[in-house]
Amino acid sequence: MNKQIVLLPGDGIGTEVIKSAQEVLIAVAEEFGHQFSFETHDIGGSAVDKHGTPLPEATVEACKQADAVLLGAVGGPKWDELPSHLRPERGLLGIRKALNLFANLRPVKGFPKLLHASPLKEEVVKGSDLLIVRELIGGLYFGQPSERRDNGETVVDTLSYTKKEIEQVVDKAFQSAQLRRKQLTSVDKANVLESSKLWREVVEEKKTAYPDVSVEHLLVDAAAMKLITNPGQFDVIVTENMFGDILSDEASVLTGSLGMLPSASLREDGVGLYEPVHGSAPDIAGKGVANPLAMILSSALMLRHSFHLENEAELIESAVQSILNEGYYTADLQVKDGQQVGTKEMTRLIVELIKSQNTTKSIQNCYA
């Protein structure tokens, strides 16, 4: 397999963690006989400094030609006083729009060694392993322009969806559930909103095409409650833009560390942008202590969802799990009775384990 991957390091620790992901992907390519070509481009604050814009046209064109995009992080106090159109975050919003990325996938998994850092009791969060699929280009954030009326005494925001916009993200959620435990929870507010009634109708129509996936409907307020009382009950959650924005942020604290959370933004043909949930962390940039695991796990999502390389994705994820189980951790994780390592050392441990695990699997297959 030969795939073109665009790297967008961005700002702060983004430049460090994206190198880690590249090293891991090179190791995977060598072990499985793939060929990954890498091309690096600017985005965010660093692009403003070099090109006067957070999203240069060359970056957009390169991403449009790529099979997938990996993004580190954007932003930092250095650019806080810039006009809104020059803010680093505009680069991220712009590339999502330019690539028509309609579905955001955010997995949330409770790693046993990290459960003590969760705000929930360990027995509540233990075993949690869910995926939130959020519609990304429709809904309240993209309705008719908001306006104020009656001398500012009245405001109007419009929630709008087309059936096609709902169908494409629901299909992606069903497909994602097929790759996991085959359970889909559709979250809406169908007891109040007409858009949610259409949403529920689409899910009911679509489920006949995925008979292997069980489906339940849940109102968003009930979903928010169950996320913190019994997160282990969820496999895949699919919901509209604003609900997904809120629920994914709520779910992100379950595991106790943003440094472990990857994400993916996809379009219909499978091309996607993959990035860690964490920010650019300028306070630790360049110190070699950043946690690369969310970026590395984002590369595993890329292998699974854009390249359909399930074994390779699972190998990366199992390597991360094993390294944590062995007690290695970066400064943000605080694993009990473990050994703290920096960015480069953590990456080296993951790469070595990928190579050894794949060799072990190959030997086992020979004698199977």
Image (tube, rainbow, N blue to C red):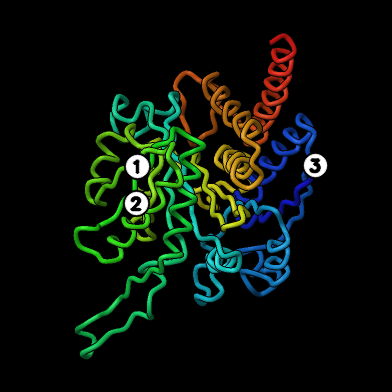
Is 328 left or right of 115, judged from the image as shown? right
Q: Which of the two discs, 1 and 2, labels the residue nearer the N terminus?
A: 2
Crowding near the residue tagged with mark 1, few <14, some 14–19, many ≥20 C-alpha atoms within 10 Å: some
User: Element under label 2?
Assistant: helix
Q: CA distance from mark 2 to mark 3?
A: 41 Å
Q: Which residue is mark 1?
A: 215
Which residue is located at x 30 percent, y 43 percent? 216
Q: Which residue is mark 2?
A: 204
User: The disc labelled 2 sits on which kind of residue?
Assistant: Glu
User: The disc labelled 3 sits on which kind of residue?
Assistant: Gln
Tag in front: 3 or 1: 1
Query: Where is residue 340 shown, x and y percent of the image?
Result: 55, 27
User: The disc labelled 1 sits on which kind of residue?
Assistant: Val
Most distant residue in the top direction: 367
Q: Give the vertical position of 111 relative to 343 (above or below).
A: above
Which residue is located at x 47 percent, y 18 percent? 337
**Mark 1 in CB contact with mark 2 (< 8 angstroms):** yes
Q: Which of the two discs, 2 and 3, labels the residue nearer the N terminus?
A: 3
Tag in front: 2 or 3: 2
Q: Which residue is mark 3?
A: 35
Most distant residue in the front direction: 208
> Which of 172 and 243 lies nearest the eye of the viewer?
172
Quadrant showing the N terminus: top right
Q: CA distance from mark 1 to mark 2?
A: 9 Å
Query: Where is residue 36 shown, x and y percent of the image?
Result: 77, 44
Which residue is located at x 31 percent, y 51 percent? 187
Crowding near the residue tagged with mark 2, few <14, some 14–19, many ≥20 C-alpha atoms within 10 Å: some
